[in-house]
Every structure is written in C-alpha cells, then in structure tokens.
Amino acid sequence: MKHIHRFLLLFALLSSSVAFGQITEDPEERRDQGQAPLKSQTPEGNPLPFKDRLRYGGGISALSFNPFSIGVSPVVAYQVTEHFVAGIGAGYTYTNWKNFYGGNLNQYSGRLFGMYEFIPNILPNLYAHVELDQRSFSTSGQLTVAGRTTGSSTATWLGATYSQPIGRLFAANLSFLYNVSYSVNSVNDQVLYGSSPFTIRILFF
C-alpha cells in the first residue's frame, strides 16, 4: 500500500512540473514555425504568468533649450490579452524661465490608459487608445501663471496608437490623441496641455 501512495505522490509531482513548464514556456519558440510570438499565452494556449506579461519603458518629452525644458515619462503596462494592453504612467517636466520671468515651472502627471488592437487582421499593431490624465503645476521664484503659482487639470484623451514591435513585450508607440476635456478658456489647460487639444507622442514600452 505504501508503494502505491509513493507512486501516486511521484505522479502528482511530475504532473505539476509538466504543467508549470507549459505555462512558463518561452513563446518565442513560435518564431521557428514562422509565426509571431504570443504575448499573453504559451504556444500550447496556456496563460503566461503575471510577471511575463509586464511591459516597462517610457520616454523623454518637452526637450528644448530656450527656455531650457525637459520631461520624463515612465510607463508600466500589462498585456491583458493578445490584443489588449492596460497601463499606468507618470510624468515630470521641468522648465527654467529664470532668464524670461525669473523662475521655474514644474509639471507633474499621472495617467491610466488602455490600448485595443481592433482590426489585427487588416491593420496589425494599430490600437484604439483611451487615456485618463491628471496633471498639476507649480512655480518657483518670481514666476506666476495668471497670478497663480499652482494649478491642475484632468484630461480624457481619445485616439490611436501605432505600436511597432521591437521584441515580444517591447515596442515603439506612436500616438495621435485628442483631449476631449480641453477648454481654450482654461489657463490650467493652456499651461499643462499647450494651445491645442491634439498631441503626438512617442513612448517605448
């Protein structure tokens, strides 16, 4: 009877090992078959672990020299399905206005976004893009904006992103977005989003 129990225990352990191996198998093996590597599952159709679906990256924005300005935008995204990506991002932009107005402008942002590849058989890597963006600014020195030293605004961006794959879970993403919440009468919107409700952005993740 003990031998039977040992055999069953050994069989259960081996079965668990095989199942774990299937889940964590590298989907890049599909390249050998002339197929694109899967993003959310193994070649056998099993879901990839959470950590193997995470995408990291970001970009540099608002780079100028007169006045000096530079921004950074880190991003963490998650491959929910083969065609849907959700993520979060943050941003910081520093602008030195000391030679013009005697101060600095600091902008901070946080965002949630979703990207859905809606016609992969016709236009692969083209995603519908929805994003909620919360931003604020603060000034230092003599610089004020319409008499204010702080301000904030929330934007809802709608548009499209073309994602050029560089690896299984990394790509160059070119986005064309429209801020449906934008108001030409809002000083905060003018400062934080510029003079137009449209934006073009490149991020790597």
Image (spheres, helix red, strand yellow):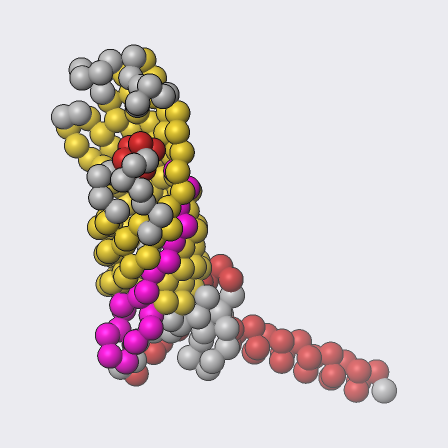
**Is residue 135 depicted above or below 30 in this figure?**
above
Side of 46 relative to 186 (left or right): right
Side of 151 relative to 194 (left or right): right
**Is residue 105 depicted above or below 17 in this figure?**
above
Quadrant location, the N terminus: bottom right
Residue 76 appears in the figure: no
Residue, far front: 185
Give residue 18's position: percent from left, percent from top: 56, 78
Side of 105 relative to 81 (left or right): left
Q: Which residue is drawn at 40% across and 42% down?
A: 154
Nearer to the camera, 171 or 143: 143
Quadrant location, the C terminus: bottom left
Q: Which residue is drawn at 44% across and 70% down?
A: 81
Tell how many labels.
Answer: 0
Q: Which residue is drawn at 57% across and 77% down?
A: 19
Give residue 147's position: percent from left, percent from top: 33, 19
Residue 150 appears in the figure: yes
Give residue 8's position: percent from left, percent from top: 74, 83
Task: Tell me where residue 163 sits by quadrant.
Answer: bottom left
Give residue 132's position: percent from left, percent from top: 41, 50
Task: Tell me where residue 176 sits by quadrant.
Answer: bottom left
**Is residue 5 depicted above or below 124 in this figure?**
below
Q: Which residue is drawn at 79% across and 87% down?
A: 4
Q: Which segment is the magenta one?
A: 117-135
Any magenta on residue 128?
A: yes
Any magenta on residue 188?
A: no
